[in-house]
Amino acid sequence: MSLSRFELAYDELRSRWPESTRERDVATPYGRTRVHVYGPADGDPLVLLPGGSATGLVWFANAPALGERYRVHAVDLLGDAGRTERRGTPLRSADDLMAWLDALLDGLGLARTHLCGHSYGAWLAVRYALRAPRRVDRLALVDPTQVFAGFRAGYLLRALPTLLRPSEVRARAFLAWETAGLRLDETWRRVYALAATVPGRKLIAGGRPRTAGLRMPVLVLLAENSRAHHAAEVAEEARRTLPRGQVVLLPGATHHSLPLTAPKPLNDRLLDFLG
C-alpha cells in the first residue's frame, strides 16, 4: 500500500530530527500513541505537546538543544494527524484527553515530568497540570490559546473555511496569512497543510481553565505578532492569575510560526526556566 502525501511529508520531516532519536508507540486505552524520544537516558523528562495539525515532529528545531540536557518526549496528539492511533475507548471529551495523558505518562514510565505545549497543546498542558499537579514539575506554555484569552474574531473568520471544508490549499492560505510573510520550513508547511486532508481528525475543544489553580512554576512565551489573540491581553491576564508565573514576549514571532521561528531564543528561555 503506497504512502499518502501526508505520510511522505511526515517521514521527510522525521529525518530532520537527530540521528539517535527513537520512536515509541505507547499503548493507551485510546490507541497507540507515537512519541519521538531524544536526549540522554538519565536526563530529566520533558514532554512536548504540539499545536493542532503540527504533529510532534514540529519540535525538530528545538530538540537538539533541549535534548542536550533533557530526555525529550515529543507527542503526536490523540485525535490529530500523525502516527497516533485512535482505537479502543472512544474519544469524546477533555476528560478523555486527560485520561489519555495519564496513560501515556504511565506507559513512558514518567511519574513526574516537565511539560511544555504550544497553542492547543498548551491548553492540554494546562488542563493536565490542573488535574494532576503531582506529575508536573514545571509548565511551559508557548503562545497558549483558549487559556488566558479567547481567539480574535478575525482569526476565527480566517480559520473557518479550513475547518468547514478542509483542504491543503485552504490550510496553506491560512498559514500564509497568520505568519505574515515569515519564511517557514517548507517540509513542515507541507505537513501542516496536508494534515487538514487526513480523514477522521477529531480535536476536542473546551472552556478556558482556571489558571489561578496552577501552583507549579509556569513560563508563558508569547508571539509578539500573533494573530490568534492579542499578546498584550494574554500577558496581562497571565501575570494577574499565575501565582508563580513568568511572561516573555518573543519578538517577530507569530502564532503558527512557533516553535520554528527563532528557535534559539525560545530554546534559551525554556532551558533557563527549566534549569
Image (cartoon, rainbow, N blue to C red):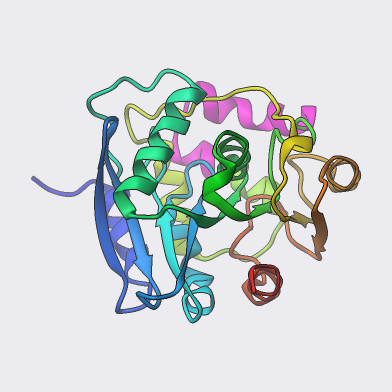
Residue 18 in view of the camera: yes
Q: Is residue 131 left or right of residue 273?
A: left
**Name of the residue lying farthest toward the left:** 1
Q: Is residue 59 above or below residue 54?
A: below
x then y, percent, for residue 126 = 63, 40
x then y, percent, for residue 90 = 32, 20
Q: Nearer the viewer, residue 235 or 129?
A: 129
x then y, percent, for residue 266 = 67, 69
Q: Is residue 149 left or right of residue 185?
A: right
Residue 154 counted in the magenta span: yes
Name the quarter where the N terminus is drawn: top left
Q: Nearer the viewer, residue 176 or 246?
A: 246
Q: Residue at x 47, y 29 (%)?
A: 203
Q: Is residue 176 left or right of residue 234?
A: left
Q: Is residue 140 above or below residue 267?
A: above
Name the quarter where the C terminus is drawn: bottom right
Q: Residue at x 40, y 55 (%)?
A: 110
Q: Quadrant of residue 80?
A: top left
Q: Residue at x 81, y 66 (%)?
A: 251
Residue 213 counted in the magenta span: no
x then y, percent, for residue 154 = 77, 31
Q: Nearer the viewer, residue 187 or 213?
A: 213
Residue 224 in view of the camera: no
Q: Residue at x 53, y 79 (%)?
A: 65
- The residues colored magenta run 152-173
Q: Is residue 246 above or below residue 81?
A: below
Q: Nearer the viewer, residue 43 or 255?
A: 43
Q: How many marks?
A: 0
User: What secondary structure do most residues of the magenta stretch adopt?
Assistant: helix
